[in-house]
Image: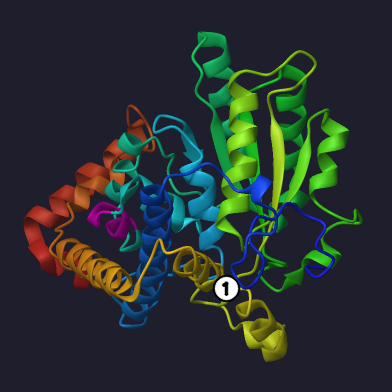
Amino acid sequence: MDYDDGEFVRVLDEDGHVVDEETMPDLSDETLVGMYRDMRLTRHFDQRAINIQRQGRIGTFASAAGQEGAQVGSTYALADDDWILYQYREHGAVVVRGLDAGYLEYWMGHESGNASLADKHIFPLNIAIADHLPHAVGMSWASKLKGDDRAAVVHFGDGATSEGDFHEAMNFAGVFDTPTIFFCNNNGWAISHPVENQTATDTIAVKADAYGMPGVRVDGMDPLACYAVTKEAVERARNPAEGETRPTLIEAVTYRFGAHTTADDPTVYRDDEEVEKWKARDPLSRFEAFLHRTDRLDDELDADIQAAVEDHVARIIDESSEFEADPESMFEDAYAELPPELRRQREGFLSMLERYGDEAFLRD
């Protein structure tokens, strides 16, 4: 993946300088600092989640470190009732909408954590690669048919572009002109598979041409650029000018600093030199430098933000640790009405619980 050619939309350079004042989004100082705070919260949550996973307190976790600029920047461009459909790594999108204990409960294995996202207009976390893309198109098509102006932004990785669901969703969105923003977080690796072996096209953004929609390539390590291109795409999705199409494909060129998940060892397939090269483009330090340079942030405010971030994450970890799951809940949600076989299994399970109590979980 070639980052150095600079053939993408960019607002900030790697040192946090504005490349061109005309590209600078019109955002208040409060909004800019809020964006920085949410990026810091995403990074700290990510670090703590990995730590408690190592302690056996949550299940396998996918790290977002390095991709906060794309996630937070793009979400700031949305209205509160626009729908977000994400893969499993875009914790920054959840942070912007409100990070609470419910989200952590999902990673502890409780489906109720997914349910808590609905009030935030976020679809449940998606593990199967790319199968949420047709759902995003269906949701946005429904918005168009109902005559409301909601858009749907769907996040996915570069690996998803090799799945049939990606192409089917893109084609449907193009044909039916749905208000869908396809946001590809191209972090260079689909687990251990490099993006160079993922596609024969020079970029992912160029794939938009085949489906009759605009495609744009953006610096995914630049939160302001990600905000700008998403804002433009959302406005076009709501009110396309004559001759314009509603859907857009955005390719955010970014990088994951850590492993694919906590079950992965990235040292097997990439070297430290590559990782350090990308860490020099860290979206968090780049944005921090910009805010300091423009007097929107000082050391005292920065320290206050960090303290608030640490308190926030510590609180939701404590709250989620007190959650007591109902074993019967494992039979919920898959069906509106349980089929006979699952009803039989549930009755047998509840009978065993009544007879043996907690010891039922310890029996062979």
Q: In the image, what residue occupies the spot 70% across and 54% down? A: 20
Specify the quadrant of the image occupied by residue 280: bottom right
Residue 91: x %, y % from top left: 44, 57
Q: What element carries label 1?
A: loop
* Residue 151 on the magenta segment: no
Specify the quadrant of the image occupied by residue 69: bottom right
In the foreground, 233 or 202: 233
Q: In the image, what residue occupies the spot 33% across and 76% down? A: 299
* Residue 288 relative to residue 241: left or right: left
Q: Looking at the picture, does residue 40 appear above or below residue 242?
A: below
In the foreground, 351 or 58: 58
- Neighbours of disc 1 within 10 Å: few (<14), some (14-19), many (20+): many
Q: Looking at the picture, does residue 329 appear above or below residue 284?
A: above
Q: What residue type is labelled 1?
A: Asp
Q: In the image, what residue occupies the spot 59% across and 31% down? A: 234
Q: Looking at the picture, does residue 95 appear above or below residue 209?
A: below
In the foreground, 191 or 327: 191
Magenta stretch, main secondary structure, is: helix
Residue 265: x %, y % from top left: 59, 83
Q: In the image, what residue occupies the spot 24% across and 70% down? A: 304
* Residue 251 relative to residue 31: left or right: right
Magenta stretch in the rendered image? 100-106
Residue carrying label 1: 282
Specify the quadrant of the image occupied by residue 179: top right
Query: Does the rendering let one see residue 300?
Result: yes
